[in-house]
Every structure is written in C-alpha cells, then in structure tokens.
Image: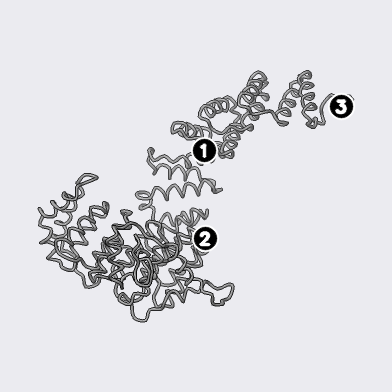
Amino acid sequence: MGSSCVGGRDCEGFGQGIVKHQRCRLAVLDGGGKGFKDERRLHIRLFKRLFSSKPSSPSSHPPLSAFFAPALRPPPSEFLPDFPGRRFPAGRRRPWPSVNARISRIAHEILSLSSEPDISDVSTILESRSVASLLREFPDGSASLELMFHLRSRPLLALEVFNWRREQLGEASEEEHAKAITLAGRAGDLNRAAEIFLSGCANGVKSSSMYNALMGAYMYNGESKKALSVFEDLRVDEDCGSPTIASYNILISVFSRLMLVDHMEAVVQSIRDAGLSLSRITYNVLIRGYITAWMWEEMERTFNAMGEAGIRPDLQTHLLMLRGYAHSGNIEKMEMTYRLVKKHVDENDIHLIRTMICSYCKSVDPEKIRKIEALMALIPKEDYRPWLNVLLIRVYAQEGLMEGMEELIQEALDHNTVVVAMGVMRAIVSGYYHNDAVDRLAAFTRRAEAARWRMCRSLYHCQMVMYAAQDRFEDMHGVLMQMDRLNLWRVKRTYVIMYKAYMKAGMRRHVERVIGTLWKLGYDVPQDAPILSES
C-alpha cells in the first residue's frame, strides 16, 4: 500500500505520529492489513537514537537515557503488566460467582464447536444465551474479559466474541482492547492485532495497556523491530503518559531474545531513572535474558538482588533458576531448587525434566544413573526424543551398563533414529570392549550397518582385537572383509593389530606377510619385527 502519513512517513511503520493523524489511521485500516513496510528505515531510526554520537566512556552502556525519557508524572494505573489475562484493575469489580458460572457454561459451549467453526455459529450461541444483556450488566467490561479469558485456549474464537461485542454494544473498553490485541498476537495474526489497536485509537479508546499488548504481540511472534517501534510511539504519545514498568519489561524481553545484554542492563538503569521500581516480572525477564546468553554469574547475581530488594521469588522465578542451574551444570543448586518446585515440574514441565537429565549426563555424580532413571520414569514412553535417547546411550556405555545401553539402542532402532556422532559410536565400542562382549559387539555392528548409522574403523578394529584375544582368526578375517565391503580402507593401525595378533599366536608366515605389506605401503615396521632382529 502506498499511503503515507503527514511528514512523508509510511503509516504502517508505526512511527511517532501513529495515533495523531486520522489520515494515517484510515489508510492502515482501509489497507486490509497488507503488512508493514519501511521496517528497516524505522529500525535504523530507532537505533540511531539508541547509539547517539555523543562521546561516552568506552566501558559505558549505549546512551539509552536519551531514548527513554524519564516519567514527568506518575504513570497511570495499568491493566495487566505484561499480557492481559484474568486480572482486573483497581476499582473494577469482577462478576459474582453465579454470573461467572454462567459465563463458564457459555464458554464451554463455544469451545465445543468444531476446529474450524463458522463465524455465525459463535454469534448464534451468543444471541441464544442473551449474552448481550449479560454484558450490559457490566458496562466496565469485566464480564466480557471473563468470557475471553475462558476462551483463551482458542484465541480466534475469543476474537470473534470481541467483534460481536463491539457490534452489539458499541466500542469496548481499553482493557478489552488490550485483551483482544494479546489474543490476536497469540493467534499469530499481527495484522489483526494492529487493526484492533488502531480502531480503538480512532474511536478515542487508548491506553498504555493497549501499547503494551501490541508490543507483547510483536515480541511473542518474534517481530522485535516492530515491538521496539511501538515502544517509541508510546514514549512520545502524551495522551498515554510515560511508559510503565510493564512497557519496560517487554522491552527487556525483546533485548533478551536478541541476546543484547548491554541493552537489557541499560533499560534497567532507565527504569530507575524514570523513578519506577523493578517488579518481580522485571527480575524474571532479566534472569531469562541471562540464561539465554549463558551468563550464569549474572543470572545468580540478579536472583540475589531480587531477594535484597524484598521481592519474593515466585514459581516462574524458581523454574527459571532451575533451568539455569541445569544448563550450567550446577548439580547441587539444581537439586535444591528442584525440591522447591518438584510437584509442578513433575506434573507440568517435561521439557525441564529433560534438561535436568541432560545435566546429570554431563556430570560426575556417582549416583547419576539412579537419578536419571527416576526422572525418566516421569516422561511418558510415547514422548520420545532422539537426542535424549542418543545421549543416554552414551552415558550408559560410559558407565559400562550393557543391558541398559542395548535397550536404548533397540529403542533408537525402533524409532528409526540414525546416530552419526562418532563420540557415541566410540563410547558404545568401548562399553563392549571393557565387558569383553565381542559377539554382542558384532551383532550391534550388523544392526547399525542396516540402520545406516555412521560406522567407524574403531568399531571394526575393536572386534579384531577381541577376536584375536580369543584366537578366533577366521572371525577376524571376516571383519577385514566387512571393512573392505564398506570401503573402509586399511590403515597402519589395522596392520599393527594383525601383526600383534599373529605374533602372539606364533604365526610367523602371516607376520612376515604383514611386515611386507607395511614396507610396501611406506609405513614404519614395528621395532620387534623378527626380520629386523635377524638382519
């Protein structure tokens, strides 16, 4: 779309004049959401402000204080600090239990619709259940918010309820707009999120919570540049006041996803400069950012600062710290944190359980196998992950636990997992060797070849050594033929193994033949070779 707003700026770029020019708003709304243009220009403009040309000390952060204007007045009370959910602003009443039960039944009926329902089906339910009269009893929008909350698992249905509510009762409240923007973001429909925002602004409904919801929608879908641009619009919009702590929290989250740690820390300083206090969510977002950047000391320092500030960690904080300790290999603190949130993790967070198993696999804990098996029991059998299976094969092989290793190998074969890591193959070979299980190694080799696992010479060399130790030279020769069939050419170590095997068995003719082959190929002959000792 070629429409542009006053000043020659593209209206879809969400620049400083996003809510000030009616012409710009109408151009975006009429365009049908064809996408955002000039994004690169907006990004460059934004970061020019972030990195001003004013001189600063080499060790200082980028001069973000020029970008984050301090709050000149107390920030307005906001609705839902990060993402609109089931919270109600101060002074807003919640529906009483009987009404809430009715809303729950209506939501259940809507959720029972097919995966791709007709829009008219939603309207039919709402009209047959006299939802309009119900919503009129709560002009502040609390009943509408409660209904959308119950429909959050299917955001597109919740958005249809929001549209129907606007058609029936007129313009919705700021909080309802914020909730709808968030739902559109969760559904991945960013054009719709922007349309809801601009439509509300065009009808005189505008608040920092709507800006925050739009920022959150962009962040949730990985559109970091647009989220930053929306923050800039909020900062210059005098009608909404200064950015709130929720705005800064989303901004920190944007930078943490980009692993721009210096920017994260600069935003924290800007929060303090604006006279705001860091919230529990702020600390959680910072901890998440440090975990993303694998900065374990900073992660723990932020956690300690949270306690010093008198803010009690919540479940999300402990889950983040558990993940950080697991990734950093801090087994002692990982176990201590796990005890605090064990029930929740065991019932709801299989991904975090896998992370802990991975940490145990890399540790030197003497009881790691017992602990790994206790955690594996919490993962359903059908929830198979190839990378975890292969990692466990290696651990069991290193621990010499052949039965467990072979069960895991069979599981990998059953799921058509192809192992290509040489370290894993060598660990398997080493496990069989230390258990003197050459026949089991040979059987594994045949199965691995058929499954197209990455084969290595070490696997065949080990079989040769083990066959030679049992004077099974015919089987050793069969391994050589197997190598030739797979185009694994013989190297010096292959001949040295043969030489030592024949020497030990007193097979002088074969020894001389191997020495001749070594000479022919230009390899050094072993010093104890009999032909050299006689010369």
Horizontally, residue 511 falls left or right of residue 256, namely right
User: Amino acid under label 1?
Assistant: Ile
Task: Name which quarter of the figure residue 502 lies in.
Answer: top right
Residue 379: mark in rendering: none
Q: Residues within 10 Å of mark 2 (few under 14, many from 20)?
A: some
Q: Position of residue 437 (x, y in %)?
A: 58, 28
Among the 4 quarters of the image, the one containing residue 80: bottom left
Q: How is the image coloured?
A: one colour
In this rendering, does residue 279 appear at all?
no
* Quarter of the picture holding the C terminus: top right
Q: Residue at x 12, y 61 (%)?
A: 134
Q: Which residue is mark 2?
A: 296
Mark 2 is on which residue type? Trp
Where does label 3 land, which residue? 533
Instruction: Please name the residue that numbered disc 1 is placed on.
Output: 393
Residue positioned 65% across, 29% down in the render: 461
